Amino acid sequence: MLIRYNKAINSALKEEMQKDPTVFIAGEDVANAGGSFGITRGLLDEFGPERVIDTPISESAIVGMAVGASSTGLRPVIEIMFMDFIAVCFDPIINQAAKMRYMSGGQMTLPLVIRTQSGAGVNAGPQHSQSLEALLFHIPGIKVVMPSNPYDAKGLLKASIRDNNPVVFIENKALYGMKGEVPEEDYTIPLGEAKIVKEGKDVTIVALGQMVNKAMAAAQTLENNGISPEIIDPRTISPLDTETIKQSVKKTGRLIIVHEAVKIGGVGAEIAAMVQEEVFDYLDAPIQRVAAPFTPVPYSKPLENYYLPNENDIIQAVNKICVGRQFSIAGHS
Protein backbone atom coordinates (compact mmCIF):
# COMPACT_ATOMS: atom_id res chain seq x y z
CA MET A 1 0.00 0.00 0.00
CA LEU A 2 1.10 3.58 -0.66
CA ILE A 3 1.52 5.51 2.62
CA ARG A 4 3.47 8.48 3.94
CA TYR A 5 6.69 8.23 5.96
CA ASN A 6 4.96 9.47 9.13
CA LYS A 7 2.17 6.91 8.76
CA ALA A 8 4.74 4.14 8.27
CA ILE A 9 6.31 5.01 11.64
CA ASN A 10 2.89 5.15 13.30
CA SER A 11 2.06 1.75 11.84
CA ALA A 12 5.31 0.23 13.11
CA LEU A 13 4.64 1.52 16.62
CA LYS A 14 1.08 0.22 16.61
CA GLU A 15 2.03 -3.23 15.35
CA GLU A 16 4.86 -3.68 17.82
CA MET A 17 2.67 -2.56 20.73
CA GLN A 18 0.01 -5.05 19.65
CA LYS A 19 2.60 -7.82 19.41
CA ASP A 20 4.51 -7.15 22.64
CA PRO A 21 2.88 -5.81 25.85
CA THR A 22 6.29 -4.71 27.20
CA VAL A 23 6.52 -2.00 24.50
CA PHE A 24 5.37 1.43 25.64
CA ILE A 25 5.69 5.00 24.35
CA ALA A 26 6.67 8.07 26.35
CA GLY A 27 7.58 11.66 25.59
CA GLU A 28 6.38 15.22 25.44
CA ASP A 29 2.86 15.48 23.95
CA VAL A 30 2.91 11.93 22.56
CA ALA A 31 -0.42 10.95 24.17
CA ASN A 32 -3.26 13.49 24.06
CA ALA A 33 -1.74 15.57 21.26
CA GLY A 34 -0.54 12.57 19.25
CA GLY A 35 3.02 13.89 19.05
CA SER A 36 4.36 17.19 17.79
CA PHE A 37 4.37 15.78 14.24
CA GLY A 38 1.30 13.57 14.67
CA ILE A 39 3.35 10.37 14.67
CA THR A 40 1.69 8.81 17.73
CA ARG A 41 -1.85 9.91 16.83
CA GLY A 42 -4.49 7.33 17.75
CA LEU A 43 -2.22 5.18 19.92
CA LEU A 44 -3.53 6.55 23.23
CA ASP A 45 -7.08 5.52 22.31
CA GLU A 46 -6.00 1.97 21.54
CA PHE A 47 -3.43 1.31 24.26
CA GLY A 48 -4.39 3.68 27.08
CA PRO A 49 -2.41 6.06 29.34
CA GLU A 50 -0.31 3.31 30.92
CA ARG A 51 1.40 2.55 27.60
CA VAL A 52 1.24 5.95 25.88
CA ILE A 53 2.57 8.41 28.41
CA ASP A 54 2.85 12.20 28.33
CA THR A 55 5.94 13.23 30.27
CA PRO A 56 7.12 16.49 31.83
CA ILE A 57 9.24 18.77 29.65
CA SER A 58 12.53 17.23 30.77
CA GLU A 59 14.46 15.33 28.13
CA SER A 60 17.00 14.08 30.66
CA ALA A 61 14.22 12.66 32.86
CA ILE A 62 12.56 10.99 29.83
CA VAL A 63 15.75 9.19 28.85
CA GLY A 64 16.65 8.37 32.45
CA MET A 65 13.24 6.79 32.97
CA ALA A 66 13.61 4.79 29.76
CA VAL A 67 17.07 3.51 30.71
CA GLY A 68 15.71 2.28 34.03
CA ALA A 69 12.61 0.75 32.46
CA SER A 70 14.58 -1.06 29.74
CA SER A 71 17.01 -2.48 32.29
CA THR A 72 14.07 -4.23 34.00
CA GLY A 73 12.80 -5.89 30.81
CA LEU A 74 10.41 -3.31 29.36
CA ARG A 75 10.86 -1.94 25.84
CA PRO A 76 10.34 1.82 25.93
CA VAL A 77 10.11 3.85 22.75
CA ILE A 78 10.63 7.46 23.74
CA GLU A 79 10.50 10.61 21.66
CA ILE A 80 12.90 13.52 21.91
CA MET A 81 10.86 16.07 20.01
CA PHE A 82 13.76 17.66 18.11
CA MET A 83 17.21 16.16 17.79
CA ASP A 84 18.65 19.46 18.96
CA PHE A 85 17.27 18.67 22.43
CA ILE A 86 19.24 15.43 22.64
CA ALA A 87 22.14 17.50 23.95
CA VAL A 88 20.17 17.98 27.17
CA CYS A 89 20.18 14.23 27.85
CA PHE A 90 23.65 13.14 26.81
CA ASP A 91 24.54 11.82 30.27
CA PRO A 92 21.84 9.11 30.44
CA ILE A 93 22.43 8.23 26.77
CA ILE A 94 26.22 8.23 26.64
CA ASN A 95 27.18 7.32 30.19
CA GLN A 96 24.31 5.00 31.12
CA ALA A 97 22.43 3.47 28.16
CA ALA A 98 25.55 2.99 26.03
CA LYS A 99 27.60 1.45 28.86
CA MET A 100 25.33 -0.74 30.99
CA ARG A 101 25.38 -3.89 28.86
CA TYR A 102 29.17 -3.71 28.55
CA MET A 103 29.69 -3.03 32.26
CA SER A 104 27.44 -5.93 33.24
CA GLY A 105 29.33 -8.37 31.04
CA GLY A 106 26.27 -8.83 28.85
CA GLN A 107 24.01 -9.81 31.75
CA MET A 108 21.88 -6.70 31.32
CA THR A 109 20.11 -5.76 28.09
CA LEU A 110 18.88 -2.27 27.18
CA PRO A 111 16.03 -2.63 24.64
CA LEU A 112 15.48 1.11 24.32
CA VAL A 113 14.55 3.17 21.26
CA ILE A 114 14.96 6.94 21.18
CA ARG A 115 13.00 8.43 18.31
CA THR A 116 14.06 11.93 17.35
CA GLN A 117 13.58 14.39 14.48
CA SER A 118 16.53 15.95 12.67
CA GLY A 119 17.17 18.10 9.66
CA ALA A 120 16.65 21.50 8.11
CA GLY A 121 14.47 22.68 5.25
CA VAL A 122 11.33 23.48 7.24
CA ASN A 123 12.33 26.99 8.37
CA ALA A 124 12.60 25.97 12.04
CA GLY A 125 15.73 27.94 12.91
CA PRO A 126 19.17 26.94 14.23
CA GLN A 127 17.94 25.33 17.48
CA HIS A 128 15.38 23.03 15.81
CA SER A 129 17.09 22.01 12.55
CA GLN A 130 20.38 20.29 13.32
CA SER A 131 21.67 16.92 12.13
CA LEU A 132 23.72 15.62 15.05
CA GLU A 133 24.16 11.97 14.13
CA ALA A 134 27.96 12.23 14.18
CA LEU A 135 27.90 12.95 17.93
CA LEU A 136 26.16 9.61 18.56
CA PHE A 137 28.08 7.75 15.84
CA HIS A 138 31.20 8.33 17.95
CA ILE A 139 29.82 6.46 20.99
CA PRO A 140 30.27 2.66 21.30
CA GLY A 141 27.17 0.87 22.57
CA ILE A 142 24.53 2.87 20.68
CA LYS A 143 22.98 1.89 17.38
CA VAL A 144 22.08 4.78 15.08
CA VAL A 145 19.43 4.44 12.36
CA MET A 146 18.62 6.92 9.56
CA PRO A 147 15.80 5.75 7.25
CA SER A 148 15.36 7.58 3.94
CA ASN A 149 11.90 6.35 2.86
CA PRO A 150 8.63 4.95 4.26
CA TYR A 151 9.45 1.28 3.59
CA ASP A 152 12.75 1.47 5.43
CA ALA A 153 11.29 3.63 8.20
CA LYS A 154 8.76 0.96 9.14
CA GLY A 155 11.06 -2.05 8.78
CA LEU A 156 13.96 -0.44 10.59
CA LEU A 157 11.80 0.84 13.45
CA LYS A 158 10.30 -2.59 14.04
CA ALA A 159 13.79 -4.10 14.07
CA SER A 160 14.98 -1.36 16.45
CA ILE A 161 12.16 -2.04 18.91
CA ARG A 162 12.98 -5.75 18.91
CA ASP A 163 16.72 -5.14 19.38
CA ASN A 164 18.20 -5.65 22.84
CA ASN A 165 20.49 -2.63 22.59
CA PRO A 166 19.81 1.12 22.78
CA VAL A 167 18.92 2.55 19.37
CA VAL A 168 18.66 6.18 18.33
CA PHE A 169 16.17 6.32 15.46
CA ILE A 170 16.60 9.53 13.48
CA GLU A 171 13.67 10.75 11.37
CA ASN A 172 14.29 13.64 9.00
CA LYS A 173 11.40 16.12 9.35
CA ALA A 174 11.43 16.91 5.64
CA LEU A 175 10.57 13.28 4.85
CA TYR A 176 7.36 12.98 6.89
CA GLY A 177 5.16 13.70 3.86
CA MET A 178 7.05 11.39 1.51
CA LYS A 179 4.92 8.58 0.05
CA GLY A 180 6.14 5.06 -0.65
CA GLU A 181 5.02 1.47 -1.01
CA VAL A 182 4.86 -0.36 2.33
CA PRO A 183 3.69 -4.00 2.63
CA GLU A 184 0.77 -4.73 4.92
CA GLU A 185 2.37 -7.92 6.18
CA ASP A 186 4.90 -7.94 9.03
CA TYR A 187 8.52 -7.34 8.03
CA THR A 188 11.75 -6.03 9.50
CA ILE A 189 14.99 -4.72 8.01
CA PRO A 190 18.17 -5.91 9.78
CA LEU A 191 20.20 -3.16 11.41
CA GLY A 192 23.65 -2.82 9.88
CA GLU A 193 22.76 -3.77 6.30
CA ALA A 194 23.16 -1.11 3.63
CA LYS A 195 21.00 -1.01 0.52
CA ILE A 196 22.25 -0.46 -3.01
CA VAL A 197 19.48 1.88 -4.12
CA LYS A 198 20.82 2.13 -7.66
CA GLU A 199 23.50 0.06 -9.31
CA GLY A 200 26.15 1.81 -11.40
CA LYS A 201 29.72 1.51 -12.62
CA ASP A 202 31.38 4.96 -12.72
CA VAL A 203 31.16 6.44 -9.22
CA THR A 204 29.89 5.34 -5.79
CA ILE A 205 27.64 7.80 -3.94
CA VAL A 206 27.02 6.99 -0.28
CA ALA A 207 24.17 9.18 0.98
CA LEU A 208 22.59 9.45 4.44
CA GLY A 209 18.92 10.00 5.27
CA GLN A 210 17.05 12.34 2.99
CA MET A 211 20.22 12.92 0.95
CA VAL A 212 19.54 9.52 -0.64
CA ASN A 213 16.63 11.15 -2.45
CA LYS A 214 18.81 14.09 -3.51
CA ALA A 215 21.36 11.62 -4.87
CA MET A 216 18.67 9.78 -6.83
CA ALA A 217 17.50 13.07 -8.34
CA ALA A 218 21.09 13.89 -9.31
CA ALA A 219 21.50 10.42 -10.80
CA GLN A 220 18.93 11.16 -13.49
CA THR A 221 21.01 14.05 -14.81
CA LEU A 222 24.24 12.08 -14.45
CA GLU A 223 22.82 9.17 -16.44
CA ASN A 224 21.63 11.55 -19.16
CA ASN A 225 25.21 12.79 -19.45
CA GLY A 226 26.83 9.39 -19.69
CA ILE A 227 27.83 8.80 -16.06
CA SER A 228 26.50 5.75 -14.22
CA PRO A 229 26.46 6.34 -10.43
CA GLU A 230 25.98 3.60 -7.86
CA ILE A 231 23.98 4.92 -4.89
CA ILE A 232 24.25 3.32 -1.46
CA ASP A 233 21.98 4.03 1.49
CA PRO A 234 23.69 2.77 4.69
CA ARG A 235 20.31 2.93 6.50
CA THR A 236 22.15 2.49 9.79
CA ILE A 237 25.39 4.32 10.47
CA SER A 238 26.14 2.35 13.63
CA PRO A 239 26.67 -0.46 12.91
CA LEU A 240 27.93 0.66 9.51
CA ASP A 241 27.95 -1.78 6.61
CA THR A 242 31.49 -1.07 5.46
CA GLU A 243 31.68 -4.16 3.26
CA THR A 244 28.98 -2.98 0.85
CA ILE A 245 30.71 0.39 0.54
CA LYS A 246 34.12 -1.17 -0.06
CA GLN A 247 32.86 -3.58 -2.69
CA SER A 248 31.18 -0.73 -4.55
CA VAL A 249 34.34 1.40 -4.47
CA LYS A 250 36.33 -1.56 -5.78
CA LYS A 251 33.94 -1.64 -8.74
CA THR A 252 33.69 2.10 -9.51
CA GLY A 253 37.06 3.45 -8.32
CA ARG A 254 35.44 6.69 -7.14
CA LEU A 255 33.59 7.72 -3.97
CA ILE A 256 31.35 10.64 -2.97
CA ILE A 257 29.75 10.82 0.48
CA VAL A 258 26.68 13.03 1.00
CA HIS A 259 25.11 14.08 4.30
CA GLU A 260 23.08 17.02 5.53
CA ALA A 261 25.18 17.54 8.66
CA VAL A 262 28.15 19.88 8.56
CA LYS A 263 31.18 18.48 6.75
CA ILE A 264 33.73 18.90 9.55
CA GLY A 265 33.74 15.86 11.84
CA GLY A 266 30.81 14.29 10.04
CA VAL A 267 30.07 10.63 9.32
CA GLY A 268 31.47 11.20 5.83
CA ALA A 269 34.93 11.76 7.28
CA GLU A 270 34.91 8.32 8.92
CA ILE A 271 33.67 6.63 5.75
CA ALA A 272 36.37 8.39 3.73
CA ALA A 273 39.05 7.34 6.22
CA MET A 274 37.84 3.73 6.21
CA VAL A 275 37.94 3.55 2.41
CA GLN A 276 41.37 5.19 2.29
CA GLU A 277 42.75 2.73 4.84
CA GLU A 278 41.22 -0.44 3.43
CA VAL A 279 40.71 -0.06 -0.33
CA PHE A 280 42.98 2.83 -1.28
CA ASP A 281 44.55 0.92 -4.18
CA TYR A 282 41.19 0.77 -5.95
CA LEU A 283 40.65 4.54 -5.95
CA ASP A 284 41.14 6.36 -9.26
CA ALA A 285 40.35 9.84 -7.90
CA PRO A 286 40.24 11.72 -4.58
CA ILE A 287 37.24 11.03 -2.33
CA GLN A 288 34.71 13.88 -2.29
CA ARG A 289 32.35 14.93 0.52
CA VAL A 290 29.13 16.88 -0.03
CA ALA A 291 27.77 18.35 3.20
CA ALA A 292 26.57 21.52 4.89
CA PRO A 293 28.91 24.43 5.65
CA PHE A 294 30.35 24.80 9.14
CA THR A 295 27.71 27.20 10.45
CA PRO A 296 24.45 27.02 12.39
CA VAL A 297 21.37 26.35 10.27
CA PRO A 298 19.98 29.72 9.09
CA TYR A 299 16.39 30.71 9.81
CA SER A 300 16.08 32.77 6.62
CA LYS A 301 14.51 30.58 3.91
CA PRO A 302 16.87 31.67 1.12
CA LEU A 303 19.88 31.14 3.39
CA GLU A 304 18.54 27.78 4.55
CA ASN A 305 18.15 26.69 0.92
CA TYR A 306 21.74 27.76 0.25
CA TYR A 307 22.90 25.91 3.37
CA LEU A 308 21.35 22.55 2.44
CA PRO A 309 23.23 20.27 0.03
CA ASN A 310 21.30 19.77 -3.20
CA GLU A 311 21.37 17.77 -6.41
CA ASN A 312 23.73 20.14 -8.17
CA ASP A 313 26.23 19.97 -5.30
CA ILE A 314 26.34 16.22 -5.86
CA ILE A 315 26.69 16.67 -9.62
CA GLN A 316 29.54 19.14 -9.18
CA ALA A 317 31.34 16.68 -6.89
CA VAL A 318 30.99 14.06 -9.62
CA ASN A 319 32.37 16.60 -12.12
CA LYS A 320 35.56 16.91 -10.07
CA ILE A 321 36.41 13.23 -10.26
CA CYS A 322 34.85 12.20 -13.57
CA VAL A 323 37.20 14.18 -15.78
CA GLY A 324 35.93 15.90 -18.91
CA ARG A 325 32.21 15.69 -18.17
CA GLN A 326 31.28 19.12 -16.87
CA PHE A 327 27.58 20.01 -16.64
CA SER A 328 24.92 21.20 -14.20
CA ILE A 329 21.15 21.37 -13.87
CA ALA A 330 18.92 24.39 -14.20
CA GLY A 331 17.81 26.05 -10.99
CA HIS A 332 20.86 25.17 -8.90
CA SER A 333 24.24 26.74 -8.53
Image: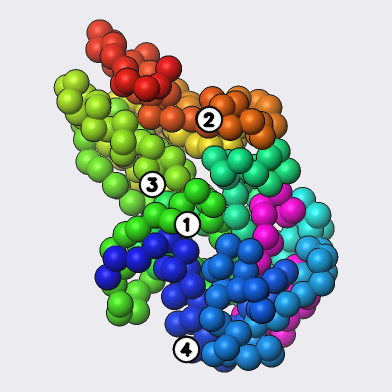
How far apart, in angstroms, are the residues tagged by discs 4 and 2? 42 Å
Q: Amino acid at mark 4?
A: Lys
Closer to the observer: label 4 or label 2?
2
How far apart, in angstroms, are the residues tagged by discs 3 and 1? 18 Å
Q: Which residue is mark 1?
A: 176
Residue drawn at (81%, 66%) of the image: 57
- Which element is circle 4 on? helix
| Vertical placement of residue 297 versus 254, above or below | below
Q: Which residues are magenta?
A: 63-86
Could you say which is closer to the camera, residue 85 or residue 204? Answer: 85
Residue drawn at (52%, 85%) of the image: 17
Q: Are marks 3 and 1 in contact (CB under 8 Å)?
A: no
**In the rendered structure, which disc, 4 or 1, sits on the residue that comes first in sequence?**
4
Asked whether, in this view, residue 102 is left or right of residue 118, the answer is right
**In the rendered structure, which disc, 3 or 1, sits on the residue that comes first in sequence?**
1
Residue drawn at (32%, 59%) of the image: 180
Residue 169: % across, % down: 56, 60
Could you say which is closer to the camera, residue 104 or residue 42? Answer: 42
Q: Amino acid at mark 1?
A: Tyr
**Residue 83 falls inside the magenta stretch:** yes
Q: Amino acid at mark 3?
A: Asp
Q: Which residue is mark 3?
A: 233
Closer to the observer: label 2 or label 3?
2
Within 10 angstroms of label 1, few (less than 14), some, or many (20 or more) residues? many
Residue 19: % across, % down: 47, 89
Within 10 angstroms of label 3, few (less than 14), some, or many (20 or more) residues? many
Q: Which residue is mark 4?
A: 19
Residue 282: % across, % down: 32, 25
Could you say which is closer to the camera, residue 137 or residue 77? Answer: 77
